[in-house]
Image (spheres, rainbow, N blue to C red):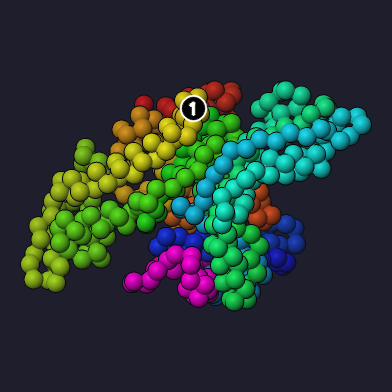
């Protein structure tokens, strides 16, 4: 098959950057031809204030993906997250311009532009405007008002803002690399596109992306984002707890966390007690599975508590989620779904990327959810990523009940 277009997506992680390269054929079909991840070097500062540091990160991950793909990268879409992003709800209304009262694309653009004309904090810029629902002549909850007839068009949106300095620094860093930056998007929006199915978008789900140094979240309901946020605690924080309590090296603590630990007290581990070297290698430390649970459970409980407190302070009870999906590297921790279920009192599942594209085995991991989601056309104009086929059921209600039934 002859391929005619190449695109790349990149996620700026708190500890690991990831990139995927996809290519389109003359018949419009897409395939993933390259992917790469770059882990933070010891002592590396992964903030967005140093342009040269950003340039190095971009070059490292994109050159690795480009080498695997064997193609030159034409344009890159990037994702960011964490405390850099703030979300502001807003509304707008405009008269429908057509004499026949039929809503046009121009009317939709106008009402969305009107909704975004609100005061925002100094030093911040609009990153994205996410429509929640439209209204025509007082009828609300409309997902797509195009060609509807009325007099007045309204919209409710969620405005995502970012520090202007961060946006400028990322743009300048891409210019120095020679790669063309197409757009910047919120990482959890991309992850939701890759993980959640239509029923989950409709009924209301909290998606939690547990990274290394932070945990981002997004709450969706009625097909749109209601709330986004981040807490400054992640998987690496839990590793640091193990290192500090047991007085062992971070590398050793990470190995214990991944291979031998759990954050859920009732987790039945088949692992034997471990013996590891203390810091400096002077003593041998005896570590039991119960000791690791005692260290990890409070930290991961803190993550979920911080998120729930933000939801309660921002939304009314009718907007609370009906389920929880966990993704990111922290989703691989043993017992994390059980602990989240206990904490939220909601059904919980682990979210992995879903795609009609043939994903390499490594990219089927929850850590790749964001970059796989960025291949969605709604974010990048790139390939259509369909959901995996599901069993046909009599209706949405039955699907929701089946989903809940997996957990009770």
Residue that appears at 62% across and 51% down:
126
Residue 223's spot in the image, x, y percent?
A: 60, 35
Classify 10 Å Cα crowding around label 1: few (below 14), some (14-19), many (20 and above): few
Residue 365 visible in image:
no
Residue 175, above or below 144: below
Residue 228 visible in image:
yes
Which region is colored magenta?
33-59
Name the outermost residue toward the right.
99
Residue 407's spot in the image, x, y percent?
A: 38, 30
Q: Using the image as rendered, state which of residue 404 and residue 241 is in the foreground.
A: 241
Asked where in the image residue 72 lies, by quadrant, the reply is bottom right
Question: Which residue does the numbered mark 1 point to in the structure image?
Answer: 316
Residue 119's spot in the image, x, y percent?
A: 62, 45
Q: Using the image as rendered, state which of residue 120 and residue 403 is in the foreground.
A: 120
Asked where in the image residue 103 lies, by quadrant, the reply is top right
Secondary structure, mark 1, is loop
Residue that appears at 34% across and 44% down:
303
Residue 282's spot in the image, x, y percent?
A: 8, 71
């Amino acid at each position: 098959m002859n391929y005619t277009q190449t695109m790349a997506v990149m996620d700026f992680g708190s500890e690991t950057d990831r990139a995927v390269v996809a290519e389109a054929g003359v018949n419009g079909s897409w395939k993933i031809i390259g992917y790469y991840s770059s882990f933070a070097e010891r002592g590396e500062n992964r903030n967005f204030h140093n342009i040269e540091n950003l340039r190095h990160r971009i070059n490292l991950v994109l050159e690795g993906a480009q080498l695997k793909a064997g193609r030159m990268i034409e344009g890159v879409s990037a994702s960011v997250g964490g405390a850099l992003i703030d979300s502001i709800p807003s509304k707008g209304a405009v008269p429908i311009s057509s004499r026949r009262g039929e809503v046009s694309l121009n009317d939709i653009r106008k009402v969305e532009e009107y909704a975004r004309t609100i005061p925002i904090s100094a030093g911040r810029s609009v990153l994205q405007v996410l429509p929640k629902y439209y209204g025509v002549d007082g009828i609300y909850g409309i997902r797509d008002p195009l060609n509807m007839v009325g007099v007045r068009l309204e919209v409710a949106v969620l405005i995502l803002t970012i520090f202007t300095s961060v946006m400028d620094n990322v743009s300048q860093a891409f210019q120095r690399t020679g790669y063309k930056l197409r757009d910047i998007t919120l990482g959890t929006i991309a992850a939701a596109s890759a993980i959640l199915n239509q029923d989950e978008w409709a009924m209301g789900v909290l998606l939690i992306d547990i990274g290394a140094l932070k945990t981002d979240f997004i709450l969706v309901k009625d097909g749109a984002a209601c709330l986004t946020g981040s807490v400054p605690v992640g998987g690496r924080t839990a590793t640091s707890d193990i290192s500090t309590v047991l007085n062992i090296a971070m590398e050793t603590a990470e190995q214990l966390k991944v291979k031998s630990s759990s954050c859920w007290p009732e987790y039945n581990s088949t692992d034997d007690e471990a013996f590891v070297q203390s810091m400096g290698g002077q003593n041998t430390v005896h570590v039991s599975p119960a000791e690791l649970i005692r260290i990890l459970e409070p930290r991961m409980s803190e993550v979920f508590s911080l998120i729930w407190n933000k939801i309660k302070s921002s939304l009314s009870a009718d907007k609370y989620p009906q389920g929880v999906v966990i993704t990111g590297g922290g989703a691989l921790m043993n017992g994390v779904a059980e602990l989240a279920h206990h904490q939220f009192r909601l059904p919980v599942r682990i979210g992995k990327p879903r795609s009609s594209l043939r994903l390499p085995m490594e990219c089927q991991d929850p850590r790749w959810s964001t970059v796989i989601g960025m291949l969605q056309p709604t974010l990048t104009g790139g390939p259509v990523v369909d959901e995996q086929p599901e069993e046909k059921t009599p209706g949405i209600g039955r699907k929701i009940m089946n989903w809940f039934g997996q957990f009770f």
